[in-house]
Image: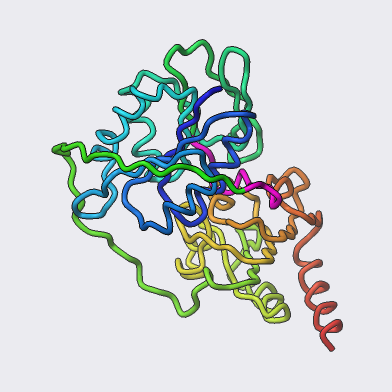
Amino acid sequence: MRDILVLIEDLIDAPAELAAAARCFGDVQTTAFVSGGTESEHQMLAGLFDCVKVAPAASDANWCAEFLCAQILPLLDSMQPHLVLMHHTNNGLDLAPLLAAKSDRPMLADCISLESRENGVSAVRTVFGGKVHARISATDSATGYFATVRSGAFSMPEDTATKSGSIVALPLIETAPRRRFIETITPEAGAVDITQSEILVAVGRGIDDEDNMEIVEELADALGAELACTRPVVDKGWLEKSRQVGTSGLTVKPKIYLTVGVSGSFQHLGGIKGGPFMVAINQDAAAPIFAAADVGIVGDLFDLVPLLEEKIRERKG
């Protein structure tokens, strides 16, 4: 039976998503690695993986790829896993290439699907701003493989049986990182915290002009939703940074996500978690947002949005 090692960074959403990604390889032995965390968090991981390896946290309790690399490399040597999985986040991009290079393993990055092949691993990732799906593969590696997966690309079926994994404490491996954590700079909070909103209306560059924002604001008001946006809207100064969703903005987990004039780049979709019911309005039928949407409407947003707002207000009476 093949071994898969999963490196846990985020203890909220990441474990279940990474466990789901590991399931793509069929009947495998899964081991989760985590640095620090609480006993209840370790028990949660044991319900998803066959084994949980717990390393001590860094002394300053902050992310340090060199420290984690020193803790994980001996585990790679002893386990010799067929595959090592991690999320494609800023921290993942810091740690995964470092580990892959030091352990001489080929790496597949930003995968949205994974598949086991007889002589290696195959994956799909998006390119050209999400407009094209590219199949990539790594083959004939005697040491195994690395893959980083996109947040939100994998989900565990609701009827998945809970595991009773073992929990093993790992000894601290002393290291002297050349980089050190200085501080976390937190942006000023906006007037509204969109991460707590159950319904979001997200607007993209398709709105064309700041003067057109009013029709989207009216739609959000009719729905009882908060307004969110893509990075280009923030760059143009039409909405504040605190409303930006994406890998360079905020991560949201609404129940309903309605997009207006949003193309659907992976940077934006990477900030959407929890599999919300997604509705997309875009005049470009080839826009990648439609691949992620539950309902897609192809048409002119300047015709559709006012009509949708009117019908919603009529329905609400």
Quadrant for residue 176, please give it. top left
On-image quarter of the C terminus: bottom right
Q: Which of 30 and 71 is in front in this view?
A: 30
> Where residue 258 sits in the image (x, y, percent)?
69, 64
Give left or right: position of 177 versus 260: left
Location of residue 230 by image quarter: bottom right
In this view of the protein, which residue sits in the foreground, 94 or 63? Answer: 63
Lateral position of residue 90 relative to residue 260, left or right: left
Q: Where is residue 140 in the image (x, y as percent from the top left)?
A: 51, 10
Q: Does the magenta stretch include residue 52?
A: no
Residue at coordinates 37% horizontally, 45% vertically from top-left?
34
User: In the shown orientation, is residue 40 left or right of residue 134?
Assistant: left
Q: Position of residue 238 (x, y in %)?
A: 52, 69
| Residue at 78% in and 47% down | 285
Q: Which residue is painted at 20% across and 54% down in the image?
A: 60
Judged from this view, the residue extending furthest toward the bottom is 317
Foreground of the two, 26 or 85:
26
The residue positioned 74% from the left and 55% from the top of the image is 282
Image coords of residue 35 (percent x, y): 32, 46
> Quarter-wise, where is residue 225 in the image?
bottom right
The magenta stretch is 148-161
Quadrant housing the N terminus: top right
